[in-house]
Structures are given as structure tokens and as C-alpha cells.
Image (spheres, grey):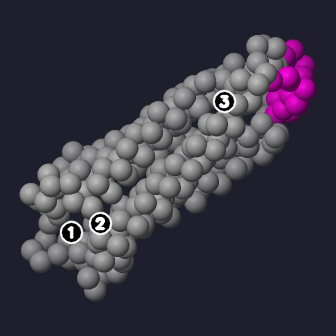
Amino acid sequence: MTRSGNNAGTSRYDDDLENTWGCASWFEYIFTVIIASVLLIGATALTLFWVIYYRNGFAWRDDPKIQFNLHPVLMVAGFITLSGFSILLYRLCRCLKHIYAKMAHTLFHTLAIPCVAIGFLAVYDSHNLNSPPIPNFYSLHSWLGLVTMGLFALQFVIGFFTFLVCLCCAKMTYGCRGAMVPIHASLGLATFLLAIASCISGLTQKAIWTLGDQYSKFTEEGIIINALGCVFIALAILVSFAVRRSNAPATAKVYVTERL
């Protein structure tokens, strides 16, 4: 499961494309990729449908109540869809060299940053500009969201400097990067699951506030909200499975730390 020290620094990112998979492994791989991709795209699409069809679309500071609608769409797009694809690309792209998978992983996380930033600004403005103003950072949803954003920022900074900048002196930093891989992977999955929890708590909070007694009467909007929550739960299960389950056969020449 390991390579000699002489080759570790130079061939670490070479994918072993000679491994033979059985039918079950290929089926599991294809099923995971297809279903996860559909759900990741579907999460943002269903959020867009809900906001446009039931919540009157989008606005900026001229209409704070509708400005709020940017918050769920951008947070789902950033924390769920883009971050989810980033995790899956890094773990499931077996046709790419490892360094290219890292670059794709970083790119998707980078694209998530403006989504999260604008989504946070939208809800903050909508609360402060509302008449009367709505208090900030008091609900469980907001606490979970702040923790998620903090972990996301920490993960990005550590990952950028550890796995990209440190490649400039790969031989000197090999041990450090090897030690950071399981920590980075575990915190990354924890951040994604926290994002799922934040989205579900936010959906529940929004449904209770906006639908009130109608929520218990199985209205169309309530069903859409519940369906979106089920998509998030399915993604939590599927992405966790994809990250922790190694699809490689027992004879594959991979690093244990790279697959944790």
C-alpha cells in the first residue's frame, strides 16, 4: 500500500490506471456518480423553482423581503452543489492525475466563495433593512451557518497553502502534507454535513415563519420545501458514502492517507 521513499516525491500524483475492477465496483462507481450529480444539480434547481414560483423571485436592497431570496439559492449553490461536486471530483475522478483532481477540487471550492459571500450579505441586508429590523444571529440556523462558514474558510486556507503552495517544495513538505490529508478530509466532510444541517434548519424555520398554520395542511409549497430537505438528507448519505468508501480493488496501488 506504500511506495518506496525514492519514488514517493516524484510519482505520488500518478494514477494507477492498470487496476481491474469487477462489475460490482463499476456499477457502484457509476451509480454513485450519476445519482450524486443529479441530486447536487437538483438541489439548486429545486431551490430556484421554490424561490421563483412561490417567493416572487429576486431583488436587491430596494425590496429587502425579496432580497432575502438570494440567500437560500446562493447558499445551496455554494455550500451544497459546488462544494459537493468539489468533494466528488476529488474522490471519484479516476481518469485524472491526482494533481489535476486537486486543481479541480480547489476550483469548485473557489467558485463557492462568492456564492456564500453574496448569500450572507443578502440575508444580513434583508434583516437590517426590513421595517422593523429583524435581529441577526439568534437562531440555531444562524449559529450553524456561522460555524459552517468559519470551517469552510479555515479549510480553504489550510488546503490552499498545504496542498498547493507547498508543492513548490514537494520533497520538504511531503510529510506535512501526508499528515494533513486525513485531517483535511475529515473536516471537509464535517463542513459539508454542517452545511446540510444549516440548510435543513433554515428550510424548517422559513416554512414555519411564512406558511404558519398552512404548513400542516400539506400545501404545495410545504411539500416542495420538505422534498428539498429530503434531497439534502440523501446528499448527506450519498456524499458521505462516496468519501469514506474506497472503490479501488484490494490490489490497487494507492496511498491509504489519500483515500481517507
Q: Position of residue 143 (x, y in %)?
A: 26, 46
Name the residue tied to disc 2: 123
Q: Is residue 155 magenta?
A: no
Position above or below: 225 against 93: below
Q: Which residue is mark 1?
A: 127
Is any atom of residue 122 visible in this view?
A: no
Task: Report the magenta stretch's main SS.
Answer: loop
The residue lying toward the viewer, choosing from 31 and 126, is: 31
Q: Is residue 99 above or below residue 132?
A: above
Q: Which residues are magenta?
A: 3-21
Name the residue rendered at 69%, 19% in the picture: 256
Q: Quadrant of residue 118?
A: bottom left
Q: Nearer the viewer, mark 2 or mark 3?
A: 3
- Pair 1/3: label in front: 3
- CA separation in Å, label 2 and label 1: 6 Å
x, y percent for residue 159: 60, 41
Report the side of 33 relative to 18 (left or right): left
